[in-house]
Structure formats: structure tokens, C-alpha cells
Image: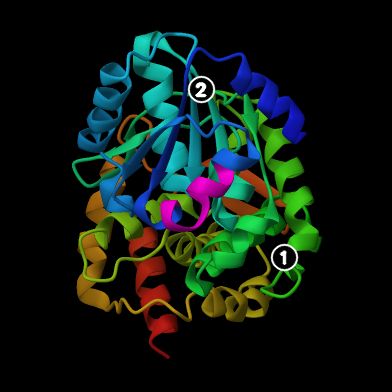
Amino acid sequence: MRLEELKRILADASQVFVLTDENVAMYWLPELKHWLDCERAVEIVVKAGERNKTLDTARLVWDALLKHGADRHAVLVNLGGGMITDLGGFVASCYQRGIRFVNVPTTLLAMVDAAIGGKTGVDFEGCKNQIGVFAEPVEVMISPVYLSTLPERDLYSGLAEMVKYGFIDDSDMLQVNECNYEQYLLRAGEIKKDLVERDFKEEGPRKVLNFGHTLGHALESYTMNAADPLTHGESVAMGMWCALWLSVKQCGLDETVLDDYGPTLRMLLSLATTEFDAEDVDGVLAYLAHDKKNLAGQTLFVLLEDIADPVWDQEVPESLVRQSLEALFAFLNQ
């Protein structure tokens, strides 16, 4: 979007609040306020990390809005990664039944996924995004300049979501890597924007965006309280490996697809330190019961009949899901 348009939105607001986390604040908070001509904006800084995307943190933000007299004409600017855009969008959409919010993603993952599409929410009782609403930001400001301070592990996390677009929509996206990703940023956003416009409430085609996320979210939740939990992208990379394995078994996907792209998914996991073995399978499976895509107690998957030919709402026997995790852990331990 044009910077001048965003400045106009903020100039018309009764008050401007900027929500960010402790890590991003050190690098980008003063610069953002300067660029947007909103030096007097109220700063709300919360602890960083997915484990802080909770109702308790949301309450802290609501308390700050209330303390500073925010009304329904205020604007909340969410400066950060997916944790902040998810949390901030949820906070804004609930406060006084909804105030406007702007997303300014500072991670690759947020730029290509979390900040786009209107999904907001917080984790609850250790389960991903259990409390939330669909609410669109009034604007999303994407600038690669923020990626200059992005740790390599977070870069790989974003690359996983970009690779996902290659599996479900555009095979060219499967060529993305840490050296060329900027040239694919626009295409990634276009793919998600198109699916969201066709199906905002995720009742049909938008569901394909969950490729790799069913087991991915379970893996992410399972490690959330570990000393070094998986990132979202690492979890999705593992979930995509399992989804490809299941697609071979259940949808007739050519097994060479898994052979060809297994190394890509392994590369995206190269900085993860969490180790798994067969004893972890039951723990991961327990989190599937809380998946938001479940229907009448049945876990549903997005699978592939071919690259860029996804099918959604696929019922998979638990025995086969278990085998996919066992195969994944064996693959990772090779």
C-alpha cells in the first residue's frame, strides 16, 4: 500500500496505538512512528514469542487501551510477526465491538501469511488459535526493509509457508529459497488474497491454505512449552511432509513428489533442535482432537492428488496418521 494513504488513515484517527513485542521494539518502533508521522502514538509492548499469544496478554492490551481512553475511532497498528498480527487483530476486533487496525508485518512468515486474510486469535490451554474471530485489517503495509534484522531461523519459517503455496497452487513457488525469496513475495500475497476473497470464512476453497497445518499445529502445540519449541514454519514443514506421505497413500500422489521435495522440507528444519521418536507420536496425536477443522470428531486433512491440485476435507484413519508421524520421525532421524 502507499505510505501516504496509511498516514491519512492515522491522521484521521482519534488516537493511534502501536502494539509490538520486546524484540521488534528495539529495532523498529521509533522508525515506524517516524515514518508514519505518529510520534505521539501510545506504545504497547508485550513479551515476544508464541507462548505469550494468550488471553492474559490480550487483557494487558485491552487494559492499556482502556487506560488511555481509546474510543471506537482509534486505530491499533500491529508491528511485528504473526504472533503480534494475530493478537492485535483479535484485540482490536473485540475492543468496543471493533476498532480499526493496521498490520505492519516484520517477518517473512507474517508478510506472506499471518498478516493477510483476516484470521485473528490467541492460543488457549496450549492449543493453537482456539479463541479468535475473522476480521480484516484496514491496511497491510509490507516492506522488505524489516527483513534485514530477521534471524535465519525465522526466515526459514516464512519460506515454509511460501513453499506451501507451491504445493497447493503455483508450482513455480517450489523454487523459492533463502536467496531468491524476495522475488516471490508479491506472488505469495496474490495467492492468499485470491483464496481469501473467494472464501473469507473458510467454508470451501480457502481450506487449501491449511495444507500441512493439521499435523503442523499439533506438532507446534506439542512443543510449545519445550526449552526450544518449533517455530510455526518448522511445524508446517513437518506437517507438509506428513501430508505428502498421506497423499501418496490415500490420493494417488506420485511418490516421487515426496522424494523430490523431502530434502527441501528437511532444509527448512535444519535449525530446529527438537528431536522426536516413536514415543512422541501419542503426544502429538492428542492435540488433533482440538483442531479447528474437525467435524463431528473426525480430523480432516488437505491432501494433494498432484502438485497444485489439492483436495480438502479428507478423512484419514488415525492408524494412517500415526504411520505418517512414525515415517516423519524416521525420516528426520536418518
x and y percent of residue 199 in the render?
64, 25
Q: Which quadrant would the C terminus be assigned to in this image?
A: bottom left
Neighbor class of circle 1 (other Cα within 10 Å; few <14, some 14-19, many 20+) is: some
For badge 1, the amino acid type reads Tyr
Residue 1 shows in this picture = no
Q: Real-space Cα distance between discs 1 and 2?
A: 28 Å
Instruction: Return the residue nearer the eye: 149 or 92.
Output: 149
Residue 145's place in the image compared with 6, above or below, is below
x and y percent of residue 149 in the render?
55, 66
x and y percent of residue 186 in the render?
78, 49
For badge 2, the amino acid type reads Ala
Residue segment shown in magenta: 25-32
Question: Which mark is drawn over residue 135?
Answer: 2
Q: Which residue is mark 1?
A: 181
Q: How is the image coloured?
A: rainbow
Magenta highlight on residue 95: no
